Amino acid sequence: MTTSLEKPYSEIQKTFADTNVFITGATGFIGHVLVEKVLRSCPVNHVYLLVRPKKSKGLYTRLNAMFDGPFFSKLRSEQPNFIKRVSLISGDCEQPNLGLSPSDEEFVVSNMNIIIHCAATIYLNGSLKRTTLINVRSTRDLLLIARRTHHLKSFVYVSTAFANTNQPVSKEIIYDCHMPGETLIDMAESLSAELIDSITKQCLKTWPNTYTFSKCIAENLVKQYGQHLPISIVRPSIVTFTKDEPITGWFTNVNSVPGLCIGIIVGAIRVGLCDKDAPAVTVPADKVANLIITAVWQGSKKSNEDSVIPIFNYVPNNLAPPLTFGQTIHALVNITKTHKIYLEKQLWVPSVLCTKYKFIFTVFFYLYHYIPAAIIDMILWITGHTFRVVPICSKAYSMMLDMSYFGTGHFKFDDRNLEALISHQSAEDKVLFDIDISKINWDKHMLSTVYGARQHIFNQNGNTAAAIKRHRMITTAYYTFNGTLYAFLLYSLYFILNCVFKFT
């Protein structure tokens, strides 16, 4: 069997050859995709993953569980013994020094060649205290460890393209922040969560949420502590389903745009708070993993005397064909209908009303979501079950409010560093670690997204008999409900007109 690890190695593969790689955030969405790609396509000596300890499971029980699943089937097929090149290191990014024991910290200092910091809490409006500890302090502490590392070849910090969207154009530079990182860390360590919550708005100033604020401050710490390290920053935009590798249409994070896509497909999301004409700033997860790997190679070429930190905005606005949120939602709804993709978990016929106005969104959300949910919960209560639909609606409402900043904004990005990086890749690396999204076909990508969701999220292969039966039942209920509603509205209109004009 031919694999991507056969010699001669490409330029990027040579950077990884016989290295020890330390990755944080490996259990997250991007981390999963990155770890799989590194193991499958990079000739590393060993990969060390930082994971939170769990009393119920030992590290190696978790190790086996992590790689047990269809996502790693291609890796298992090409390299049956790959797991021998992976070890877990117990830690927690919410704790000082990433929760590393003194012996593990010294092991990292003595043995790591490449460090990739992916770990972060992505709750947009999470507690500023917790967000600071995870996103800011862990970055500083890992940088301090990296400064002591004996044989460091490259350090990559994974930020976000939205760290500086309060600027007219987000350039590939580190913008100064009004609050030093050390000040924010001191606040998080010494003040209560309640007190910090009370002053969060004043701390954020022009940043829309705690997540983007924390990422901007973390970048400033990269500049402060990593300026003369072989370091680079990757800024992906909204990360969505995998496009090509190792399987299409795969994702795990349901708290972001992919989760809303699932809600649209099953008919659970009927109202969206977004501007139909706003650019959909999304990139596939496998391309993000390729960019992180490519940034490792680019960072390894940075000299200690070079104070400029390479930064790469990974956004589709300038390179990829245009795509708006309106086009995305329309395509997802049409794909399920035209390709007759039926789901056993379907809740309603897919249809979404979009508005960029919060008041209109709230009114229709109550009509389309809260009122039906309350009726269903009442039926559940009468039949002896607990309320569960209204809480789900409340969670969806809050999530869409949190994400409205990204769904209604018309952001501008500079990505000249990214374009230069693509041009500097060798012909082999352009294939092995493809980051060029200029030729992406969004319709095909969304079709694979829907198929992937059916297979990997709902564990359903094809249109099963149960899915077809449910589709027919939902369709019948949909047209019956709409017919009854329109008949009621027509009768009400007739009744009103009759009262006014006294029809005989």
Image (tube, helix red, strand yellow):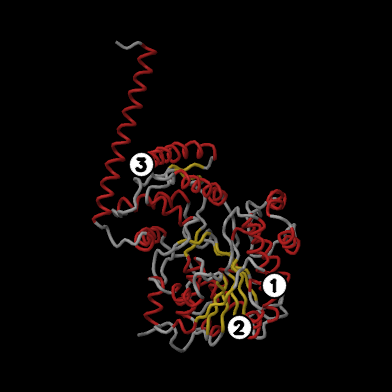
Residue 307: image quadrant is: bottom right
Instruction: State the SS at label 1.
Output: loop
Marks 3,2: beta carbons within 8 A: no
Q: Quadrant of the C terminus?
A: top left
Q: Nearer the viewer, mark 3 or mark 1?
A: 3
Q: Amino acid at mark 3?
A: Thr
Tell which of 297 and 127 is nearer to you: 127
Label disc, if present, on residue 15 of the rendered structure: none
Rendered view: 158 above or below 46: above
- Circle 1 residue: 308
User: What is the spatial separation of the Cα atoms under label 3 and label 1, in whole angstroms?
Assistant: 65 Å
In the picture as drawn, the residue positioned furthest to the front comes out as 384
Tell which of 8 and 132 is nearer to you: 132
How crowded is the residue under tag 2: few (<14 C-alpha within 10 Å), some, or many (20+)? many
- Reading the chain from its start, which is encountered first: label 3 or label 2? 2
Q: In percent of the image, x 47 and y 51: which residue is there?
A: 325
Instruction: State the SS at label 2.
Output: loop
- Circle 2 residue: 113
Residue 249: image quadrant is: bottom left
Residue 154: image quadrant is: bottom right
Label disc, if present, on residue 383 of the rendered structure: 3
Tell which of 478 and 313 is nearer to you: 478
